[in-house]
Amino acid sequence: MNKAKQLFAGLILMALGLGTARADYTLNLMKGVTKVSNDIYDLHMLILWICVFIGVVVFGAMFYSIFHHRKSKGHVAAQFHENTTVEIIWTIIPTLILVAMAIPATKTLLELSDVEKSDMTIQVTGRQWYWDYKYLDNDIHFESHLDEASERVHRTVGADPRSVPNYLLNVDKPLVIPVHKKVRFVLTSTDVIHSWWVPDLGWKKDANPGFINEAWTLVDKPGTYRGQCTELCGRDHGFMPIVVIAMEQADYDAWVKRTSEQQKQKPDLSDQSRQQLMAHGESVYLKNCVGCHQIDGAGVPGLIPALTGSAIATGKWESLDGFLRAGTSKMPKFEKLNAKEFAELMTYVRNSLGNKVGDELQPKQTALPDDDE
Amino acid sequence: MSAVVDEHDHDHHADDHHDHGPAKGLLRWIITTNHKDIGTLYLLFALTMFFVGGSMAMVIRAELFEPGLQFVDPAFFNSMTTMHALVMVFGAVMPAFVGLANWQIPLMIGATDMALPRMNNMSFWMLVAGVLLLASTLFMEGGAPNGGWTLYPPLVLQPITVGKALPFAIFSVHLLGISSIMGAINIIATIFNMRAPAMKLMDMPLFVWTWLITAFLLIAVMPVFAGAVTMLLTDKFFHTSFFNAAGGGDPVLYEHIFWFFGHPEVYIMILPTFGVASTIIPVFARKPLFGYASMVWATASIAFLSFIVWAHHMFTVGMPIAGELYFMYATMIIAVPTGVKVFNWTATMWKGAMTFETPMLFSISFVVLFTLGGFTGLMMSIAPSDFQYHDTYFIVAHFHYTLVPASIFILMAAGYFWLPKWTGHMYNEKIGQLHFWLSVISVNILFFPQHFLGLAGMPRRIPDYAVQFADWNMISSIGGFIFGASQLLFLYIVIDTIRGGTGEKVSDEVWEDAAKHGLEWTLPSPTPYHTWTTPPTIVPTEHVLDSH
């Protein structure tokens, strides 16, 4: 394997002390872009250097002993086996170091836990397997899914992850926040425990079903910051990234305006060509269904039914429609989808994934009475 | 510092030849109540499970060799991480230490056998039943449990996540728990009642002390784990809502209960490790163990602290600030007694006359690499920093450093150290050293880069990763494959030594002046089927010199 050879060569170079200056070889914690994340970085470095110091002393003594106090050099064993003074010393010194360490740690912890006086609040809801963001101050509400390119590649044996920019760390709709504002997050979940982590912000916090956690951030530097779910939440735990874009206030205000307007728009219920229905349907499928039913519709034996050849998927579309809206004990309700998405999704499921029903459904057919006013 | 008076040896030698030996054939191993046979069963079973759990780790490292989907589906990947942990913890490390306890505690305290031999047999076979039950879930519809070894609800109760496996896994935990508790009761009863009359508690070898304390930990926490999984069972099948918020329960409650078990559990795997290290290092340093009393007290303090620090596994769960502060401080304190132990081992080597046979090599690398794991543990105790480290590969690196080059290395050391005593044959030192050097180098290639991955932001328990994590993952996997393959050398050595080893007949002491350090070295090699039918009258451990 070429990569392995490259790597081996790299290792040899490193061993020769020449080093391979590769930008993506990150070794240490990142400083991040908030005051708290910088404080945490400082704590990390402080405790790291304390450990290095203790390590040098202890291992130094040990290896001195290993090299000099060996039988092959004719060293005769001393027989001491107690010394109250040194034992007291090496109990007290570590205790003092710990106390010294606890002081800055406590300060940072207190700062992190202070969610008071925030400028805005975003509700973060973990779902299998995407994040749902709700801006509590201005009614913006959207889902943030893994981008389609990563979605396709990570589900295909042998596909090349390097062909996808920000593989597994990109989403369709990033979370947008303003810089220089204290943003408070309230985190929860509707299914299992998730955990929301953006390393540049300095913390992660669990999203527990039925409970609400709080956290906050204040970003000074505009930019795009990426993270991932960090609590095992099922088969697609590795595929629900987080992208936060911090913007200058003016840009943020414009984004808020644009996004609220988009959200108020009614879906376009005009007829589509078969190709359009199928292509859009695949996108809807990749966002909402693929995590369980898989990219080929085969499901998971013993856990999740296949869509390929499924009586519900290929039966009357009206009952499929009802089924999707009602959900089951295993499957969430999909009433969040609009008529357009229902038409596209059902057309796709019935005419792809090994199914050949042959029909095509238009948004007007799937619209509920109150959809088209 | 005197060896046991010889006449006792003659006594039980004579016994051996006339006494009933083991039953013949396979039945010997099924019905045996002999502590040595049961110890052997435990050790061989643990070795088998080490390779089973290791194979699962190889699957994990193969999938993570490169980014992208290679070999296994994410759900199966999650089953592998879950089963790897459960098999290694409950099938390999814990049974291996029980096996060592069975072999060594009676030999070291001058007892004829364990106090409760029939229960001893039963606890071994319940372990086998429990592990087989767990392994059977691999072949069930919906696959083996894949919610992580911590079995957190609601994930582990979800019909789309776990198929038929859950009740089997839970019953398996019950069996393993009962087996462990019976083993622990047996060990406590043996230590308290069967010691040679001359041996006071503060005369006991450190291995015996650490196991005594470990046994109390086991009795205290295994029922808690059994309770937690039973609550999962009733939540799943009997509509209770212990952990279901919709019914008034709390999923975080499970985390608290689990880690109240889980933190002492990790010390259950490390305290006997300390005991073995404290036994081996003095023999090869040709010096008494430094600070015997402080070693005992440090072990006891660590055990006590293990009960009051559990929530440091859950700093990000959303605790009140007072809770976070308390658990941070309490956790930091553990560094003090643990430091005392490391300093004592170093002081034991200091001004010794060291030689570096395989058991000593593994023991020294244990001290060094366990200390590295301890350092990262200290870093993680700083709660704000843990907000970054938590659930990343930094944690994976941390606990593997405290388990693989610590517990596993010390188990290897114990094998090399005592196999000659048990079998009467010497192992092949050249292959032993080769095994050591391959292991110690590859284990660092395997786990050290995982620190970098975690700090760079790679979460744990993911089957695929962003491309910036690719290089270190590939290096880690290469280390993993070398480490895995190297362990076959250990298997070879164990089989070879049992079958005659180098052909060299070992002395009773096996290692130079070992009889100064422990009673077992005053017995013949190989150890007869029945030992200490007459208890020793003089206890040959060095620290006794001072106290008498």
Image (cartoon, rainbow, N blue to C red):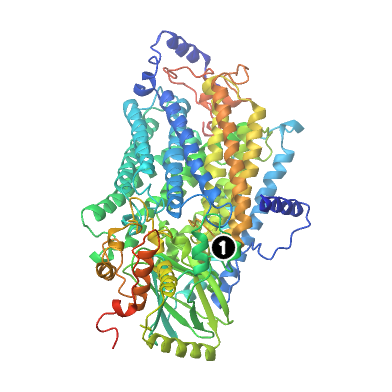
Q: Residue furthest left?
A: B238
Q: Residue at x 50, y 55 (%)?
A: B463
Residue indicated by mark 1:
B466
Q: Residue at x 70, y 40 (%)?
A: A66
In the figure, is residue A96 to the left or right of B82? right
In the figure, is residue A98 to the left or right of B208? right
Which element is circle 1 on? Answer: loop
Identify which amino acid the numbered label 1 is placed on. Ala
Percent position of residue B204, x then y: 47, 33
In this rendering, the answer to whether A129 lies above or below A224 is above
Q: Residue at x 45, y 26 (%)?
A: B40
Whether residue A128 is visible, yes or no, is yes
For the residue pair B278 and A78, the one nearer the viewer reads as B278
Q: Where on the picture, by quarter, is residue A289?
A: bottom left
Q: Residue furthest top?
A: B18
For the residue pair B289 and A275, the one nearer the viewer reads as A275
Q: Where on the picture, by quarter, is residue A207?
A: bottom left
Percent position of residue B313, x then y: 44, 58
In this rendering, the answer to whether B471 lies above or below B489 is below
Percent position of residue B295, x then y: 52, 43
Q: Where on the picture, by quarter, is residue A288?
A: bottom left
Viewport quadrant of the N terminus of chain B: top right
Whether residue B287 is visible, yes or no, is no
Q: Residues within 10 Å of mark 1 (few under 14, many from 20)?
A: many
For the residue pair A127 and B311, the one nearer the viewer reads as A127
Q: Residue at x 62, y 55 (%)?
A: B472
